Amino acid sequence: MSKAIRMTRTGGPEVMEYVDVEVGPPGPGEATVRHAAIGLNFIDVYFRTGLYPQPLPAGLGQEGAGVVEAVGEGVTEVKVGDRVAYAGRPNGAYADVRNLPAALLVALPDKIDFETAAAMMLQGLTVQYLFHRTVPLKAGDTVLFHAAAGGVGLIACQWARVMGLNLIGTVGSAEKAALAIEHGARHVINYNTDNFTEKVRELTGGEGVSVVFDSIGKDTFAGSLDCLAPLGTMVSFGNASGPVPPFNLGELQSRGSLFITRPTLATHTAKRENLEAMAKSLFGVVKSGEVKIVVQQRYNLADVARAHADLEARKTTGSTILIPAH
Ligand code: NDP
Protein backbone atom coordinates (compact mmCIF):
# COMPACT_ATOMS: atom_id res chain seq x y z
CA MET A 1 0.00 0.00 0.00
CA SER A 2 1.14 3.54 -0.59
CA LYS A 3 -0.31 6.94 0.17
CA ALA A 4 -1.96 9.40 -2.22
CA ILE A 5 -4.40 12.30 -2.31
CA ARG A 6 -7.82 11.55 -3.79
CA MET A 7 -10.87 13.76 -4.22
CA THR A 8 -14.42 12.54 -4.77
CA ARG A 9 -15.91 16.06 -5.07
CA THR A 10 -14.66 19.54 -5.92
CA GLY A 11 -14.44 22.33 -3.35
CA GLY A 12 -12.13 23.78 -0.68
CA PRO A 13 -8.85 22.26 0.52
CA GLU A 14 -10.84 19.82 2.73
CA VAL A 15 -11.93 17.77 -0.30
CA MET A 16 -8.39 16.38 -0.62
CA GLU A 17 -8.23 13.07 1.27
CA TYR A 18 -4.96 11.37 2.20
CA VAL A 19 -5.69 7.70 1.58
CA ASP A 20 -4.10 4.28 1.05
CA VAL A 21 -3.89 3.26 -2.57
CA GLU A 22 -2.69 0.17 -4.36
CA VAL A 23 -0.39 0.97 -7.30
CA GLY A 24 -0.37 -1.90 -9.77
CA PRO A 25 2.30 -2.63 -12.35
CA PRO A 26 2.77 0.03 -15.06
CA GLY A 27 0.66 -0.40 -18.20
CA PRO A 28 2.05 -0.28 -21.75
CA GLY A 29 3.95 2.99 -22.27
CA GLU A 30 3.92 3.75 -18.54
CA ALA A 31 6.58 3.96 -15.84
CA THR A 32 6.28 3.67 -12.06
CA VAL A 33 7.99 6.56 -10.29
CA ARG A 34 8.69 6.73 -6.55
CA HIS A 35 8.60 10.43 -5.71
CA ALA A 36 11.29 12.09 -3.63
CA ALA A 37 9.49 15.43 -3.92
CA ILE A 38 6.28 16.73 -5.51
CA GLY A 39 5.62 20.21 -6.93
CA LEU A 40 2.67 22.37 -5.84
CA ASN A 41 1.18 24.61 -8.53
CA PHE A 42 -1.72 26.98 -8.85
CA ILE A 43 -3.24 24.76 -11.55
CA ASP A 44 -3.84 22.18 -8.78
CA VAL A 45 -6.20 24.69 -7.16
CA TYR A 46 -8.15 25.06 -10.43
CA PHE A 47 -8.65 21.28 -10.60
CA ARG A 48 -9.54 21.06 -6.89
CA THR A 49 -12.20 23.79 -7.13
CA GLY A 50 -13.59 22.48 -10.42
CA LEU A 51 -12.65 25.58 -12.45
CA TYR A 52 -10.84 23.04 -14.64
CA PRO A 53 -13.19 20.02 -14.73
CA GLN A 54 -12.08 16.38 -14.55
CA PRO A 55 -13.97 13.11 -14.00
CA LEU A 56 -14.22 12.12 -10.30
CA PRO A 57 -12.93 10.45 -8.21
CA ALA A 58 -9.52 11.80 -9.17
CA GLY A 59 -5.98 12.43 -8.04
CA LEU A 60 -4.30 15.84 -8.11
CA GLY A 61 -0.86 17.21 -8.92
CA GLN A 62 1.10 17.51 -12.14
CA GLU A 63 4.74 17.60 -11.11
CA GLY A 64 7.24 15.39 -9.35
CA ALA A 65 10.77 14.08 -9.18
CA GLY A 66 12.08 10.68 -8.13
CA VAL A 67 13.34 7.31 -9.29
CA VAL A 68 11.89 4.93 -11.89
CA GLU A 69 10.91 1.67 -10.16
CA ALA A 70 9.40 -0.21 -13.11
CA VAL A 71 8.59 0.28 -16.77
CA GLY A 72 5.73 -1.10 -18.86
CA GLU A 73 5.76 -2.67 -22.27
CA GLY A 74 7.24 -0.58 -25.07
CA VAL A 75 8.87 2.08 -22.88
CA THR A 76 12.03 3.48 -24.46
CA GLU A 77 12.34 6.90 -22.78
CA VAL A 78 13.59 5.73 -19.35
CA LYS A 79 14.79 2.63 -17.53
CA VAL A 80 14.58 1.28 -13.97
CA GLY A 81 16.82 3.26 -11.59
CA ASP A 82 16.82 6.50 -13.62
CA ARG A 83 16.52 9.80 -11.75
CA VAL A 84 13.63 11.61 -13.45
CA ALA A 85 11.31 14.59 -13.22
CA TYR A 86 8.14 15.63 -15.04
CA ALA A 87 5.41 18.21 -15.40
CA GLY A 88 2.01 17.64 -16.96
CA ARG A 89 -1.16 15.64 -17.00
CA PRO A 90 -2.67 13.24 -16.05
CA ASN A 91 -3.20 14.51 -12.50
CA GLY A 92 -1.93 12.22 -9.75
CA ALA A 93 1.43 13.55 -8.59
CA TYR A 94 0.22 13.94 -4.99
CA ALA A 95 1.35 10.38 -4.16
CA ASP A 96 4.32 8.48 -2.77
CA VAL A 97 4.47 6.40 -5.91
CA ARG A 98 2.48 6.47 -9.15
CA ASN A 99 2.25 5.20 -12.71
CA LEU A 100 2.34 7.75 -15.51
CA PRO A 101 3.13 7.97 -19.23
CA ALA A 102 6.89 7.50 -19.66
CA ALA A 103 6.84 10.08 -22.46
CA LEU A 104 6.39 12.80 -19.82
CA LEU A 105 9.59 11.85 -17.99
CA VAL A 106 12.89 13.65 -18.44
CA ALA A 107 16.21 12.31 -17.13
CA LEU A 108 17.65 14.60 -14.45
CA PRO A 109 21.23 15.81 -14.67
CA ASP A 110 23.33 14.75 -11.63
CA LYS A 111 23.77 18.38 -10.60
CA ILE A 112 20.05 18.91 -10.08
CA ASP A 113 18.62 17.50 -6.85
CA PHE A 114 15.09 16.11 -6.52
CA GLU A 115 13.65 19.02 -4.51
CA THR A 116 14.91 21.57 -7.03
CA ALA A 117 13.55 19.45 -9.87
CA ALA A 118 10.12 19.02 -8.30
CA ALA A 119 9.95 22.77 -7.71
CA MET A 120 10.99 23.85 -11.17
CA MET A 121 9.67 21.56 -13.87
CA LEU A 122 6.21 23.06 -14.31
CA GLN A 123 7.06 26.66 -13.43
CA GLY A 124 10.45 26.67 -15.18
CA LEU A 125 9.20 25.05 -18.39
CA THR A 126 6.42 27.63 -18.34
CA VAL A 127 8.86 30.53 -18.24
CA GLN A 128 10.89 28.78 -20.95
CA TYR A 129 7.95 28.70 -23.36
CA LEU A 130 6.66 32.15 -22.36
CA PHE A 131 10.02 33.81 -23.07
CA HIS A 132 11.33 31.61 -25.89
CA ARG A 133 8.36 30.16 -27.73
CA THR A 134 5.47 32.62 -27.34
CA VAL A 135 6.56 36.14 -28.33
CA PRO A 136 9.83 37.12 -30.02
CA LEU A 137 11.77 38.94 -27.27
CA LYS A 138 15.13 40.68 -27.42
CA ALA A 139 17.47 42.34 -24.93
CA GLY A 140 16.18 45.77 -23.98
CA ASP A 141 12.47 44.92 -24.40
CA THR A 142 10.26 46.09 -21.56
CA VAL A 143 7.67 43.59 -20.33
CA LEU A 144 5.14 43.52 -17.50
CA PHE A 145 5.00 40.31 -15.45
CA HIS A 146 2.25 39.93 -12.85
CA ALA A 147 2.72 37.99 -9.57
CA ALA A 148 6.48 38.44 -9.88
CA ALA A 149 7.28 37.01 -6.44
CA GLY A 150 5.38 33.75 -7.01
CA GLY A 151 6.71 30.42 -8.23
CA VAL A 152 6.59 31.23 -11.94
CA GLY A 153 7.35 34.87 -11.10
CA LEU A 154 10.72 34.46 -9.37
CA ILE A 155 11.95 32.22 -12.19
CA ALA A 156 10.73 34.80 -14.73
CA CYS A 157 12.54 37.65 -12.94
CA GLN A 158 15.84 35.76 -13.09
CA TRP A 159 15.42 34.47 -16.64
CA ALA A 160 14.53 38.01 -17.78
CA ARG A 161 17.81 39.23 -16.28
CA VAL A 162 19.69 36.53 -18.24
CA MET A 163 18.00 37.73 -21.46
CA GLY A 164 18.52 41.43 -20.75
CA LEU A 165 14.79 42.12 -20.53
CA ASN A 166 13.56 45.10 -18.60
CA LEU A 167 10.97 43.31 -16.45
CA ILE A 168 8.42 45.31 -14.50
CA GLY A 169 6.87 43.02 -11.90
CA THR A 170 3.66 43.38 -9.92
CA VAL A 171 3.30 42.01 -6.38
CA GLY A 172 0.94 42.22 -3.43
CA SER A 173 3.24 43.37 -0.60
CA ALA A 174 6.45 45.25 0.21
CA GLU A 175 8.23 42.00 1.17
CA LYS A 176 7.31 40.45 -2.17
CA ALA A 177 8.53 43.59 -3.94
CA ALA A 178 11.95 43.25 -2.32
CA LEU A 179 12.11 39.58 -3.30
CA ALA A 180 11.28 40.28 -6.95
CA ILE A 181 13.92 43.03 -7.17
CA GLU A 182 16.51 40.77 -5.54
CA HIS A 183 15.82 38.17 -8.25
CA GLY A 184 16.14 40.49 -11.23
CA ALA A 185 13.00 42.59 -11.73
CA ARG A 186 14.02 46.12 -12.82
CA HIS A 187 10.96 47.74 -11.26
CA VAL A 188 8.21 46.47 -9.02
CA ILE A 189 4.68 47.77 -8.51
CA ASN A 190 2.58 46.84 -5.50
CA TYR A 191 -0.86 46.55 -7.10
CA ASN A 192 -2.54 46.57 -3.71
CA THR A 193 -1.36 50.11 -3.01
CA ASP A 194 -0.79 51.57 -6.49
CA ASN A 195 -2.68 51.66 -9.78
CA PHE A 196 -0.41 49.40 -11.83
CA THR A 197 -1.56 50.79 -15.19
CA GLU A 198 -0.66 54.35 -14.22
CA LYS A 199 2.68 53.21 -12.79
CA VAL A 200 3.55 51.32 -15.97
CA ARG A 201 2.80 54.43 -18.06
CA GLU A 202 5.00 56.46 -15.70
CA LEU A 203 7.87 53.97 -15.85
CA THR A 204 7.78 53.76 -19.65
CA GLY A 205 7.50 57.50 -20.31
CA GLY A 206 3.90 57.04 -21.46
CA GLU A 207 4.77 54.44 -24.11
CA GLY A 208 3.61 51.25 -22.48
CA VAL A 209 5.24 47.81 -22.61
CA SER A 210 5.65 45.46 -25.55
CA VAL A 211 4.35 42.36 -23.73
CA VAL A 212 2.20 41.71 -20.66
CA PHE A 213 2.39 38.27 -19.03
CA ASP A 214 -0.85 38.04 -17.04
CA SER A 215 -1.61 35.01 -14.85
CA ILE A 216 -3.98 36.84 -12.50
CA GLY A 217 -6.89 36.91 -14.97
CA LYS A 218 -10.16 38.57 -13.96
CA ASP A 219 -8.77 41.31 -11.66
CA THR A 220 -5.95 42.52 -13.94
CA PHE A 221 -6.98 41.72 -17.52
CA ALA A 222 -8.46 45.11 -18.49
CA GLY A 223 -5.67 47.06 -16.76
CA SER A 224 -3.09 44.88 -18.47
CA LEU A 225 -4.44 45.74 -21.91
CA ASP A 226 -4.06 49.42 -20.98
CA CYS A 227 -0.35 48.86 -20.24
CA LEU A 228 0.46 47.74 -23.79
CA ALA A 229 2.12 49.88 -26.43
CA PRO A 230 0.54 49.72 -29.92
CA LEU A 231 1.30 46.36 -31.59
CA GLY A 232 2.02 44.90 -28.15
CA THR A 233 1.08 41.36 -27.09
CA MET A 234 -1.13 40.25 -24.24
CA VAL A 235 -0.14 36.81 -22.95
CA SER A 236 -2.97 35.69 -20.68
CA PHE A 237 -1.73 32.47 -19.08
CA GLY A 238 -3.64 32.01 -15.82
CA ASN A 239 -6.64 32.82 -13.63
CA ALA A 240 -5.46 33.16 -10.03
CA SER A 241 -8.24 35.72 -9.35
CA GLY A 242 -10.81 34.00 -11.59
CA PRO A 243 -11.26 33.50 -15.33
CA VAL A 244 -11.15 36.45 -17.72
CA PRO A 245 -14.71 37.41 -18.75
CA PRO A 246 -15.60 37.37 -22.46
CA PHE A 247 -14.35 40.49 -24.19
CA ASN A 248 -14.83 42.43 -27.39
CA LEU A 249 -12.12 42.06 -30.05
CA GLY A 250 -12.57 45.77 -30.73
CA GLU A 251 -10.57 46.33 -27.50
CA LEU A 252 -7.49 45.19 -29.41
CA GLN A 253 -8.20 47.52 -32.31
CA SER A 254 -8.86 50.64 -30.23
CA ARG A 255 -5.60 50.23 -28.29
CA GLY A 256 -3.52 49.97 -31.46
CA SER A 257 -3.53 46.60 -33.25
CA LEU A 258 -2.73 44.52 -30.17
CA PHE A 259 -2.06 40.77 -30.26
CA ILE A 260 -3.42 38.30 -27.72
CA THR A 261 -2.72 34.67 -26.88
CA ARG A 262 -3.92 32.24 -24.20
CA PRO A 263 -1.19 29.58 -24.07
CA THR A 264 -0.73 26.46 -21.98
CA LEU A 265 2.37 24.42 -21.18
CA ALA A 266 0.80 21.16 -22.35
CA THR A 267 0.66 22.36 -25.97
CA HIS A 268 4.34 23.23 -25.94
CA THR A 269 5.49 19.94 -24.38
CA ALA A 270 3.14 17.69 -26.37
CA LYS A 271 5.88 16.67 -28.78
CA ARG A 272 8.69 14.78 -27.08
CA GLU A 273 11.36 16.67 -29.05
CA ASN A 274 10.01 20.01 -27.79
CA LEU A 275 9.83 18.77 -24.20
CA GLU A 276 13.45 17.62 -24.39
CA ALA A 277 14.65 20.89 -25.94
CA MET A 278 12.75 22.98 -23.37
CA ALA A 279 14.06 20.87 -20.47
CA LYS A 280 17.61 21.21 -21.80
CA SER A 281 17.19 24.99 -21.91
CA LEU A 282 15.81 25.07 -18.33
CA PHE A 283 18.48 22.71 -16.99
CA GLY A 284 21.10 24.91 -18.66
CA VAL A 285 20.17 28.12 -16.83
CA VAL A 286 19.72 26.28 -13.54
CA LYS A 287 23.04 24.38 -13.76
CA SER A 288 24.88 27.58 -14.63
CA GLY A 289 23.41 29.25 -11.54
CA GLU A 290 21.82 32.02 -13.63
CA VAL A 291 18.39 30.91 -12.43
CA LYS A 292 18.14 29.71 -8.84
CA ILE A 293 15.06 27.74 -7.89
CA VAL A 294 13.75 29.29 -4.70
CA VAL A 295 11.96 26.64 -2.63
CA GLN A 296 10.34 28.84 -0.01
CA GLN A 297 7.79 26.37 1.40
CA ARG A 298 7.92 22.65 2.16
CA TYR A 299 4.93 20.67 3.47
CA ASN A 300 4.43 16.98 4.14
CA LEU A 301 2.16 15.46 1.52
CA ALA A 302 -0.34 14.69 4.30
CA ASP A 303 -0.56 18.46 5.00
CA VAL A 304 -1.43 19.42 1.43
CA ALA A 305 -4.67 21.10 2.54
CA ARG A 306 -2.61 23.67 4.46
CA ALA A 307 -0.35 24.16 1.43
CA HIS A 308 -3.37 24.89 -0.80
CA ALA A 309 -4.88 27.28 1.74
CA ASP A 310 -1.59 29.21 2.00
CA LEU A 311 -1.17 29.40 -1.80
CA GLU A 312 -4.72 30.68 -2.28
CA ALA A 313 -4.35 33.18 0.59
CA ARG A 314 -1.30 34.63 -1.22
CA LYS A 315 0.92 33.72 1.75
CA THR A 316 3.54 31.88 -0.31
CA THR A 317 6.45 33.21 -2.35
CA GLY A 318 8.65 31.37 -4.85
CA SER A 319 8.10 27.63 -5.26
CA THR A 320 6.47 25.10 -2.94
CA ILE A 321 7.10 21.37 -2.66
CA LEU A 322 5.35 18.49 -0.95
CA ILE A 323 7.36 15.72 0.68
CA PRO A 324 5.98 12.15 0.62
CA ALA A 325 6.06 10.08 3.82
CA HIS A 326 8.52 7.32 2.83
P1 NDP B 1 2.09 31.71 -7.57
O1 NDP B 1 3.15 31.23 -6.67
O2 NDP B 1 2.42 32.81 -8.53
O3 NDP B 1 0.82 32.11 -6.71
C1 NDP B 1 -0.17 32.92 -7.25
C2 NDP B 1 0.07 34.40 -6.92
O4 NDP B 1 -0.87 35.17 -7.66
C3 NDP B 1 -0.16 34.77 -5.47
O5 NDP B 1 0.94 34.54 -4.64
C4 NDP B 1 -0.51 36.24 -5.58
O6 NDP B 1 0.67 37.03 -5.54
C5 NDP B 1 -1.12 36.37 -6.98
N1 NDP B 1 -2.56 36.61 -6.92
C6 NDP B 1 -3.17 37.71 -7.39
N2 NDP B 1 -4.48 37.65 -7.18
C7 NDP B 1 -4.72 36.49 -6.55
C8 NDP B 1 -5.91 35.90 -6.04
N3 NDP B 1 -7.12 36.47 -6.16
N4 NDP B 1 -5.80 34.70 -5.41
C9 NDP B 1 -4.60 34.10 -5.29
N5 NDP B 1 -3.44 34.64 -5.76
C10 NDP B 1 -3.51 35.83 -6.38
O7 NDP B 1 1.51 30.46 -8.41
P2 NDP B 1 2.24 29.63 -9.59
O8 NDP B 1 3.62 30.10 -9.74
O9 NDP B 1 1.95 28.18 -9.36
O10 NDP B 1 1.40 30.05 -10.86
C11 NDP B 1 1.32 31.42 -11.25
C12 NDP B 1 0.25 31.58 -12.29
O11 NDP B 1 0.70 31.06 -13.53
C13 NDP B 1 -1.08 30.89 -11.97
O12 NDP B 1 -2.14 31.71 -12.39
C14 NDP B 1 -1.01 29.66 -12.83
O13 NDP B 1 -2.27 29.15 -13.15
C15 NDP B 1 -0.29 30.20 -14.04
N6 NDP B 1 0.38 29.14 -14.82
C16 NDP B 1 0.00 28.96 -16.12
C17 NDP B 1 0.62 28.03 -16.91
C18 NDP B 1 0.27 27.92 -18.36
O14 NDP B 1 0.96 27.20 -19.09
N7 NDP B 1 -0.75 28.59 -18.84
C19 NDP B 1 1.66 27.14 -16.38
C20 NDP B 1 2.05 27.47 -15.01
C21 NDP B 1 1.41 28.42 -14.27
P3 NDP B 1 0.59 38.56 -4.98
O15 NDP B 1 0.24 38.47 -3.54
O16 NDP B 1 1.95 39.10 -5.22
O17 NDP B 1 -0.47 39.23 -5.80
Image (cartoon, helix red, strand yellow):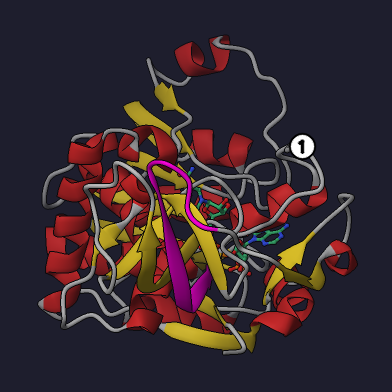
The main secondary structure of the magenta stretch is strand
Note whether 217 is above or below 156 in the view shown: above
Q: Classify residue 306 by image quadrant.
A: bottom right
In the picture provided, is 160 more to the left or to the right than 305?
Answer: left
Q: Which residues are magenta?
A: 25-39
Answer whether residue 26 is magenta in the image. Answer: yes
Is there any visible trace of residue 290 in the rendered image? Answer: no
In the picture provided, is 122 more to the left or to the right than 272?
Answer: right
For label 1, being within 8 Å of ligand 1 is answered no
Which residue in the structure is indicated by mark 1? Answer: 55
Three-letter code for the amino acid on which mark 1 is drawn:
Pro
What residue sits 83% from the left and 67% below the top?
13
Residue 116 placement (x, y as % from top left): 35, 79
The N terminus sits in image quarter: bottom right
Q: Classify residue 19 by image quadrant.
A: bottom right
Judged from the image, the secondary structure of the residue bearing numbered disc 1 is: loop
Note whether 111 is above or below 4 in the view shown: below
Residue 69 placement (x, y as % from top left): 39, 70
| Picture quadrant of ligand 1 | bottom right
Figure disc tally: 1
Answer whether residue 325 is magenta in the image. Answer: no
Q: Nearer the viewer, residue 241 or 61?
A: 61
Residue 73 placement (x, y as % from top left): 35, 44
Is there any visible trace of residue 172 in the rendered image? Answer: yes
Note whether 157 is above or below 53 in the view shown: below
Q: Nearer the viewer, residue 80 or 276?
A: 80
What residue sits 15% from the left and 57% below the top?
281
The C terminus sits in image quarter: bottom right
Residue 265 placement (x, y as % from top left): 41, 42
What residue sits 40% from the left and 82% below the top?
115
Q: Residues within 10 Å of mark 1 (few under 14, many from 20)?
A: few
